[in-house]
Image (tube, rainbow, N blue to C red):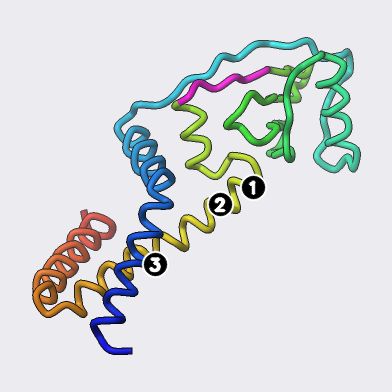
Amino acid sequence: MNKVKLRRTLVNIHLYLAAMLAPAFLLMAITGGLYLAGVQGDSVETDLAAPTGYALEAENPELEAEVRRYISDQNLDIEFDYIRGRGDSFVTRPTSRPHLRVENGEQETSVQLVEPDLLESLTELHKGHGPQIYRTYGIVVGVALFFVVFGGVLVGLLAPAYRRPTILTLAAGSLIFAYLAFWA
């Protein structure tokens, strides 16, 4: 394949990947930027009744069934993929949708229904706390972003008219990144 055909093929791959995954790229850029700027979503937390003696244990093989039974008994409209436990705290995932938060206390267990607003939901997706299928999609998006960026740089290096500007801006961007990440 000659350079012209290679460049045209790379441009097409770059274009199609970037266009198809633009919503995901924008989600990551917007939610990440807003989060770093201190603009975060919110959620409505509603305390729920916990049965007397109710406590969750991470080692319990019936943990998921126990939580599903509680959700059914409370007539809650919550679907979850798995439970994330950390010490005495448990959260149903995905947290990009209404979910439960359970805290085993010394005296009693507290259960909360957490309903995130749109920004909080999108931020949770950004963090990888969405449904399992979205987590897989996030991996695909990450790999695709690598190819979009790498392909764009490669196209710039292959085109004589863009070679020098590509090298200069790539070097400048790399230096700025390295300085801010490691020495600032």
Q: Dot 2, how many residues are within 10 Å of its Cα: few (below 14), some (14-19), or many (20+)?
A: some
Q: CA distance from mark 1 to mark 2?
A: 6 Å
Mark before the other along the chain sequence, 3 or 1:
1
Q: Which residue is drawn at the image coordinates 44% and 61% (left, top)? A: 144
Instruction: Tell me which segment is drawn in magenta.
Output: 113-118
Residue 147, labelled with which disc?
3
**Looking at the picture, which amino acid does disc 1 mark?**
Ile
Q: Percent x, y for residue 165? A: 10, 69
Q: Quadrant of residue 68?
A: top right
Mark before the other along the chain sequence, 2 or 3:
2
Whether the magenta-drawn stretch holds residue 81 is answered as no
Residue where numbered disc 2 is placed? 137
**Looking at the picture, which amino acid does disc 3 mark?**
Phe
Q: Dot 1, how many residues are within 10 Å of its Cα: few (below 14), some (14-19), or many (20+)?
A: few
* Callouts 1 and 2 close, C-beta under 8 Å: yes
Q: Is residue 175 above or below residue 93?
A: below
Q: CA distance from mark 3 to mark 1?
A: 21 Å
Residue where numbered disc 1 is placed? 133
Q: Which residue is drawn at the image coordinates 31% and 81% (left, top)? A: 6
